[in-house]
Amino acid sequence: MNKKLLSITIILLAAVIIIINLWNPFQSEKKVIAPENITEDSPTDEDIPGADLSQDLEGNLAPDFTLSTLEGESVKLSDYKGKKVILNFWATWCPPCKAEMPHMQNFYEQNKDNGIEIVAVNLTNLDNGKDAIENFAKDNQLTFSIPLDEKGTIGMQYQAFTIPTSYIIDSTGVITKKIVGPMDESMMANLTQDIK
């Protein structure tokens, strides 16, 4: 039942994206959303709540958000200002995400004392439940922050339509690069090496 529901959700999401991409060229006005604090409950776009598909996030201040972690703690992206951040969007059922996680954990262990953080936002609304996420984190011995996007608004805001999707954010909070697909340790090192 869950797999059927997930498949239907993915198909509907793809259909909505196609409709939005076809609809937007015919609209006379575009709304530009300035990055600002958002919560899971605050819609920021009329086409798809929480997403401005016309906005390229690279080079802009990363939109702030507040989510609860697996441990129930509240985490804000802006809490990491002053550090380089790899903001990752993933799910437990995603094979490339599964392949990427050991690399992320190794990279985190080697760099957590060097001003680099990993914030791995789980797309909980599309995943197999909190127990599956907790088991995945335990099995992979993940020690970095895992916020839960239970309503899907943050993943939508960050245009995480294919997972894994990651953003490299510099110490001033500016997005320097978007990566769609899995990364390994050397790629993470290269992407974080030359930024502030």
Image: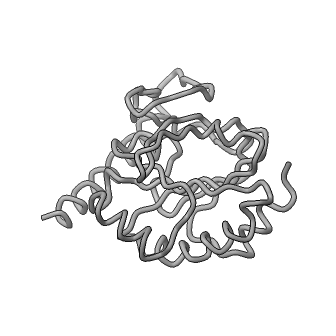
Residue at x 34%, y 42% (from the top left corner): 151
Query: Residue 80's spot in the image, x, y percent?
Result: 68, 43
- Residues 184 and 49: in front is 184
43 above or below 108?
Answer: above
Query: Residue 35's spot in the image, x, y percent?
Result: 62, 29
160 above or below 108?
Answer: above
Query: Residue 113's spot in the image, x, y percent?
Result: 76, 60
Task: Tell me where residue 191 sits by quadrant.
Answer: bottom right
- Residues 110 and 176: in front is 110
Residue at x 36%, y 63% (from the top left corner): 133
- Residues 90 and 14: in front is 90
56 above or below 36?
Answer: below
Residue at x 58%, y 34% (from the top left corner): 64
Is residue 21 visible in this depiction of the protein? no
Query: Residue 176's spot in the image, x, y percent?
Result: 75, 49
* Display colour scheme: one colour
Image position of 187 (left or right of 20): right
Image position of 191 (left or right of 167): right
